[in-house]
Amino acid sequence: MRLKKYLKDMTLVLLIFISLILVFQVWFSSNIVPNEAKNISETFQESILEPVLSFFKLNKNSTSSQDISSVFWPQKIVLNDSNKRSVLYYNSEEYQHFYQMSEDFIKNIMLGNIKIKSKDTVTLDEYFSVLKGNSIYLDYDNLYDFRLFSVSICGEADNEWSNDYSSVRECMISLGDNVLNNVSVYMRDYKSGTVFRYILEENKEALEKELDRYFLSHQSASTLSYSFELNFHKQESGDGSLSKLVFDPLILFNLVATEGKSIHSDQNWFQDWLEIESSRAGSILNTFQINPMTMLKYTDMNNARVFVENDGTLTISPNGLLEYHALESGQGLRIYETEDKSAFDIYAAASAAANFVYAVNEDLPKSAFTSIRFSTDLIENNSQGSYTIEFDLCAGGIPVMQTDPVTGERCHSITMRIENGYLKQYRQFVRLYSESDSTEPVTPVINAMDGLIDTLNPQTEYLSVFNVSRCYVDDGAAELLAPQWKVGVEGIQTILTVK
Amino acid sequence: MKRKALQKSLCGFFVLVFLFSLGIVSAFASPESLPSDIVSTKDGLITVRAPETTSSSTTNNKLTISAVASPGTIVTVYRYDGNTGQYQKIWVDGSPLEASVGSSWLFATQVDLQPGLNQFLIRGAWDEYTYSVARFDVNLLKEGFMDRVKGVITVIFN
């Protein structure tokens, strides 16, 4: 009898508890209560739920280094021999081989498994001269907060090097030259401008053997020169004459035309993919936390599916354009949870962005030929808490620039605007690229620059070029995309591309 | 009869145009060789950026040459030939090391060095008679020499 009463009480308590949760869910996840009242929900989450979850380590902000390293990798790896030079792009076997080897090497230094014999600072000239000898140069192409570099390499945001670096863009492993046998790692902190050299207590044989193996099996003549070797990084010549163009010292010039693979763009796959199974749109909705039971749904004049939830609108266009906009009156989608808003810095934003992009793309079809990587500088700016984070979809390791359907300008494949942990805007060009058998000539950088100036204004007196790298351009119409150059010029915000 | 005369004069016109264009091309093409004592007819048409000095040594058997010149300048690279006592235009894979500078004002190329002393001349020309020349020497050191240097350093540091 007592047992029966006890069971009844327990059932009653359980039912009350469940009803409370359901009421909470219905009230605070819908339009029933005004926005002001939602602050109660957030206060509850921030003051009670998060501390409890973090106590049990169930907080979903736990940064996954796996997600970061999947979108944070060198745009190119340059292997340098005293007489030869070769560029490796992601997706190639050799890239993966040398990246894994270099990553392991740096990781072991960071974790203290490889002892540092000495550490000192060197001049920029000495730093650049590393690339004239046997060396491996990891070029990340953009400036990154050091914690992103660290977590992608060794899985931890902080390590012994954290005090030396704020923002980094590249890393060089020097295997010495004919004279010196030291193996050293060089890194430049872009905030202070200091270049650190770590001379290691490590035998260089393994790395050197791999470099030799590569150059023995790839005998083609190298015609690549860095800007600093050509003295194109200085505006003034020895005789006082001025240059029209000044380049970043580490920009690599191909001095003769080479061959580059074209890629194939499948224009119609997204519409077909969505129509095969209605649940496919559901997985995207789920990531954007849009509840199919409470949302409003309609199809607009462009045949795009529009989903309206209380905090934002998600549009899925048949051409593969995915756009989310937070309502002006709403806060947007919460993708990072924190009690302290000042803790939401560039590292937290980039981590949250990487996790979110990973989640969106998890259910989308992808090929081994394509990959996603961060595409803009990720360093702390003046508007702490508000960040625009962009990603490129890369085909064969080379970024594919998209064409903005409104402005017609070049843009990145994914653009996110995040404010204090809330996603305000998300745009992704969902694309599918495959390898093509056709090749196209890749014009020498100098000829590309001639073309660029002719396009901009031949009368231009001075331009400072900070980036020249390979890309493809998808205008949404062409099926075969030829290799082009992406050029970054100081003072010009738009992405410039030239054949 | 009239038609034949017209045909003849048209043919003559095209032949003249062809010969004239040939003349222009040959007038702009740089000479195959230059005397060792050649001097600039106009200064400042070209500024050599790399190598930075007029005399240098290296162990790298490839040399990068860069220069800055105004658009339209024809830049040609020559190497001194001890047998003829003249500078000879360098040809690589059937093409001369020669380019017309574009809107970027930039010129760059790469040459293979021969062991020992290599003497180069860069000619930047607006036309056959208006040009600047710049000379520089590069000494390619043998590996054996570097090995001896390495040996000395090893002895010192050990």
Image (cartoon, coloured by chain):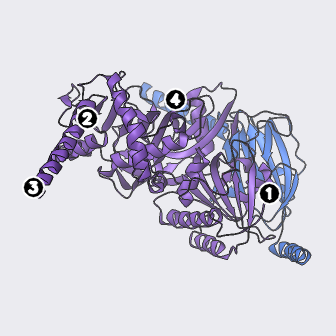
**Is residue A452 positioned above or below A441 on the image?**
above
Observer-nearest residue: B139 or A83?
A: A83
Which mark's residue is nearer the viewer, 4 or 3?
A: 3
Q: Which residue is mark 3?
A: A4
Mark 4 in CB contact with mark 3 (< 8 angstroms): no
Q: CA distance from mark 2 to mark 1?
A: 59 Å
Q: Which residue is mark 4?
A: B9
Range of residues picked out in magenta: A159-164
Q: Which residue is mark 2?
A: A24
Colour of the chain lettered B: blue
The chain letter under disc 1 is: A
Outermost residue, front direction? A2
Indicate left or right for A100 with A123 as reference.
left
Which mark's residue is nearer the viewer, 3 or 1?
A: 3
Chain ID, purple in image? A
Indicate left or right for A372 with A101 as reference.
left
Q: CA distance from mark 4 to mark 3?
A: 122 Å
Q: Main secondary structure of the magenta part?
A: loop
* Tag shown at residue A462: none
Q: Which residue is mark 1?
A: A120
Observer-nearest residue: B42 or A498?
A: A498
- Mark 3 vs 2, N-terminal side: 3
Q: Residues within 10 Å of mark 4 (few under 14, many from 20)?
A: few
Which mark's residue is nearer the viewer, 3 or 2?
A: 3
Rendering coords of residue A447 (x, y %): 60, 41
The chain letter under disc 2 is: A
